[in-house]
Image: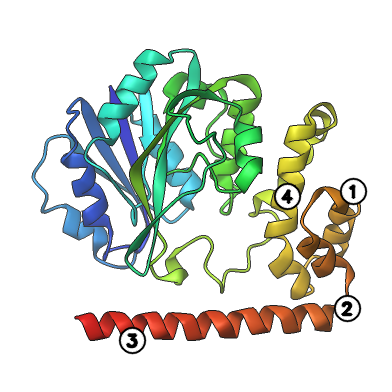
Amino acid sequence: MFSVVIPLYNKANYVEKAVRSVLSQTFRDFEVIVVDDGSTDDGFARLQSLQDDRLRLIPQKNAGVSVARNNGVKTAQYDYIAFLDADDWWDERFLEQMEKLISDYPEAALYATNYYSVKNRINRPAVIGVADNFQRGYIDYFDVYAKTFWAPVNCSYAVIKKTIFVEEKGFQPSLRMGEDLDLWLRVALKHKVGYLNQFLAYSNQDAETSQRALGAEKRWKKEEHVTFNLTYLHEYENQSPKLKYLLDGLRLRSLIPFYLQNVYSKEIREIVKKIDFSHHPFLYRFVYTWPKMLVLSYFLGKKYGSFVKQALIHTANKGRN
């Protein structure tokens, strides 16, 4: 029933755990497709030692995560595509519960489950914007996302109908940051989204930042970053206040590193001037309208405080080991 697609690029320290979490699922009707995007470490070689007929390994020249996922889907044999990043993992009941969700809510094209954000080996429950008593069912993707800005759908806990994926032509190959958000937005504009409020996936924030899309040292080109490529949604934004609020909130959050580093200043000015700051937390008015030196000092203080906090946690963990 499920084709599980895992893109791999230089995550040798994590990928075995990811794959094993799939192979140990209680629901057994699946295949696992790992697409190696030209890795330079031995992660792909390590997987070759795993003996399981459901596992297929596909090498390709480095072309980016969007192309890797798209190529994986092209070879998929089943009707539903489940995605998992190579440094994340699932609870053993993930596919079992996804199958039940699909059976109970067949009108959806996209499905997802709640998850833990793992930092310093601590599982922090994601704060998804659903009602406290919500258990399972259809959700308004835009409204739920905008309530807390914790992503309700992500490439480590999402399942999509293969026919819909093909109709939407998959992930945009040019995007390397936010490529999944772009696809979920396109799908949610046209189809229902099914959601399960159980913590059945683990998003690993402890992976090396150099191998994560949100790594602090990343400086994406505007052609690669989803926030600079959302103009096709302007017509929909004008018709949906929920969608506009969500996209403006994402713009304000994601553009801060570019703004503070004076990168793509003209483009950012054009984007920000169309946002009504009164609808968003004061922090963003402060960031984009106050003197930049003052803003930089604020973030420098936060960074120093975070460094001290992480050092204390590391020391405490070391003392317990």
For mark 2, what is the residue? 291
x, y percent for residue 34: 29, 45
Disc 1 residue crowd, few under 14, some 14–19, many 20+, Cα 10 Å: few
**147 over 262 or under it: above or below:** above
Examine the image and state in which quarter residue 144 appears: top right
Q: Amino acid at mark 1?
A: Lys
Q: Earlier in the sequence, mark 4 or mark 3?
A: 4
Q: Nearer the viewer, mark 2 or mark 3?
A: 3
Residue ID at (82%, 47%): 279
Looking at the rendered structure, the secondary structure element under dot 4 is helix
Q: Earlier in the sequence, mark 1 or mark 3?
A: 1
For mark 3, what is the residue? 315
For mark 4, what is the residue? 249
> Does residue 230 appear anywhere in the picture?
no
Q: CA distance from mark 4 to mark 2?
A: 21 Å
Q: Earlier in the sequence, mark 4 or mark 2?
A: 4
Q: Amino acid at mark 4?
A: Gly
Disc 3 residue crowd, few under 14, some 14–19, many 20+, Cα 10 Å: few
Residue ID at (22%, 46%): 21
Position of the C terminus by quadrant? bottom left
Q: Which mark is residue 274?
A: 1
Q: Earlier in the sequence, mark 2 or mark 3?
A: 2
